[in-house]
């Protein structure tokens, strides 16, 4: 979504009074890890935070504020979901070396290791060793590929018409 506020308003218009809107987005610190544009998903157009005033991102939105400002919205729940996330692997600021290592790791797997795999070499240990060294040197890790959560969820209920705020 290019215009976050407009998209939320359009979705909200589809919710009937008494109905719910559930929004789940990546957490800018846990998923993007201080790097913009996104290293993990180049399709991302914005980053999101929850109840945090300061941000490193030039395109950051506080999801709690956005939903609270919807006409007739009552926030039922607003939470950071980080199940199975290893905070030791979350980089607060990704360095140039980290970006290089991230991109090199993709190249390494595609170009360097593929010929060895075709020839039957057991490269699992080699790949793991490369990965550990790269992580030690600052390569960011997309933990969501392995089932960890790095997201924000906000659940809002649209108040019945007689109780809803006017725009």
Image: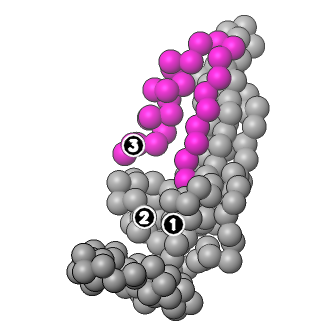
Dot 2 falls on a residue whose secondary structure is: loop
| Cα–Cα gap, marks 1 and 3 | 22 Å
Q: Dividing the image into 4 quarters, which one contains the C terminus? A: top right
**Above or below: residue 74 compared with residue 79:** above
Towards the viewer: 109 or 139:
109
Q: Which residue is drawn at 51% across and 66% down?
A: 142
Quarter occupied by residue 127: bottom left
Q: Where residue 1 is drawn, which disc sits there? A: 3
Q: Which residue is drawn at 61% across and 64% down?
A: 30
State yes or no: residue 9 in magenta.
Answer: yes
**Residue highlighted by disc 1:** 142
Residues at badges 2 and 1 in contact (C-beta under 8 Å)?
A: yes
Q: Which of marks 3 and 2 is in front?
A: 2
Q: Which residue is drawn at 50% across and 18% down?
A: 14
> How far across and down, in percent of the image, does residue 97 sit?
43, 89
Mark 2 or mark 3, which is nearer the start of the sequence? 3
Q: Tally the marks.
A: 3
**Above or below: residue 32 compared with residue 82:** below
> How far across and down, in percent of the image, does residue 132 sit?
54, 86
Q: Give the range drawn in magenta.
A: 1-26
> How far across and down, in percent of the image, does residue 25 sit?
55, 47
Towards the viewer: 97 or 146:
146
């Amino acid at each position: 979504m290019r215009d976050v506020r407009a998209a939320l308003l359009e979705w909200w218009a589809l919710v009937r009074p008494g109905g719910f809107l559930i929004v789940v987005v990546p957490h800018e610190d846990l998923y993007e890890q201080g790097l913009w544009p996104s290293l993990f998903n180049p399709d991302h157009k914005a980053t999101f935070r929850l109840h945090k005033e300061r941000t490193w991102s030039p395109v950051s939105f506080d999801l709690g504020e956005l939903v609270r400002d919807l006409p007739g919205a009552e926030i039922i729940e607003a939470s950071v979901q980080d199940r199975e996330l290893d905070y030791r692997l979350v980089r607060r600021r990704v360095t140039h070396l980290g970006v290089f290592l991230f991109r090199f790791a993709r190249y390494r797997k595609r170009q360097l290791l593929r010929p060895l795999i075709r020839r039957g070499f057991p490269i699992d240990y080699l790949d793991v060793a490369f990965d550990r060294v790269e992580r030690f040197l600052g390569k960011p890790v997309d933990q969501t590929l392995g089932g960890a959560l790095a997201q924000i969820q906000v659940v809002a209920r649209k108040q019945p018409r007689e109780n809803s705020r006017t725009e």
